[in-house]
Image: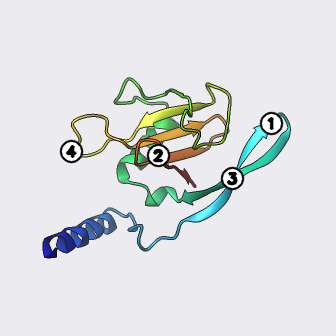
């Protein structure tokens, strides 16, 4: 148990050193997610939001790559995200695109992703689409 506590403290210290506030100190806010239907915007549901500076560093780097248009490290980056899990607001196929957030030490793409929408919204998942936060 002492080793786990020490490891957790080291992780929090490392996050602080690279300029990220540990999530334990930050508070997630809630912002209505909307669905655009023609010219009418209707409330969809509440989703937690997270400032970009509280995302993992790799997610911040991936967002910068998205804004620059690449180049992306994985061939799947920029492909259509179909929202099969229905965790994001409903939208036509092709509205969402997905991008890999590299996971240090993972032998494959890992579970972390960013999903962007045509309305310039960005969502982050650290658990392979089981849950999302909207990036502010």
Quick one: label 3, few (<14), some, or many (20+) residues within 10 Å? few
Q: Which residue is mark 1?
A: 37
| Residue 91 located left or right of residue 105 | right
Badge 4 marks a residue whose secondary structure is loop
Q: Which residue is mark 3?
A: 45
Which marked residue is nearer to the observer: mark 4 or mark 3?
3
Q: Nearer the viewer, residue 133 or 129?
A: 129
Q: Nearer the viewer, residue 131 or 49?
A: 131
Badge number at residue 105 = 4
Badge 2 marks a residue whose secondary structure is loop
Quick one: label 4, few (<14), some, or many (20+) residues within 10 Å? few
| Residue 17 located left or right of residue 117 | left
Q: CA distance from mark 2 to mark 1?
A: 26 Å
Badge 3 marks a residue whose secondary structure is strand
Q: Residue at x 56, y 29 (%)?
A: 82
Q: CA distance from mark 3 to mark 2?
A: 16 Å
Badge number at residue 130 = 2
Q: Residue at x 56, y 44 (%)?
A: 122
Badge 1 marks a residue whose secondary structure is strand
N-terminal of the two: label 2 or label 1?
A: 1
N-terminal of the two: label 3 or label 2?
A: 3
């Amino acid at each position: 148990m002492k080793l786990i506590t020490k490891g957790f403290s080291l992780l929090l210290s490392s996050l602080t050193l690279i300029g990220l506030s540990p999530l334990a100190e930050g508070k997630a806010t809630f912002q209505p997610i909307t669905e655009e239907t023609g010219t009418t915007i209707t409330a969809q549901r509440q989703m937690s939001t997270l400032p970009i500076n509280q995302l993992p560093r790799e997610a911040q780097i991936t967002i910068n790559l998205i804004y620059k248009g690449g180049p992306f490290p994985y061939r799947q980056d920029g492909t259509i995200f179909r929202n099969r899990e229905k965790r994001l607001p409903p939208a036509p196929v092709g509205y969402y695109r997905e991008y890999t957030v590299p996971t240090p030490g993972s032998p494959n793409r890992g579970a972390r992703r960013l999903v962007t929408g045509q309305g310039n919204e960005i969502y982050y998942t650290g658990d392979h689409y089981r849950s999302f936060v909207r990036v502010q």
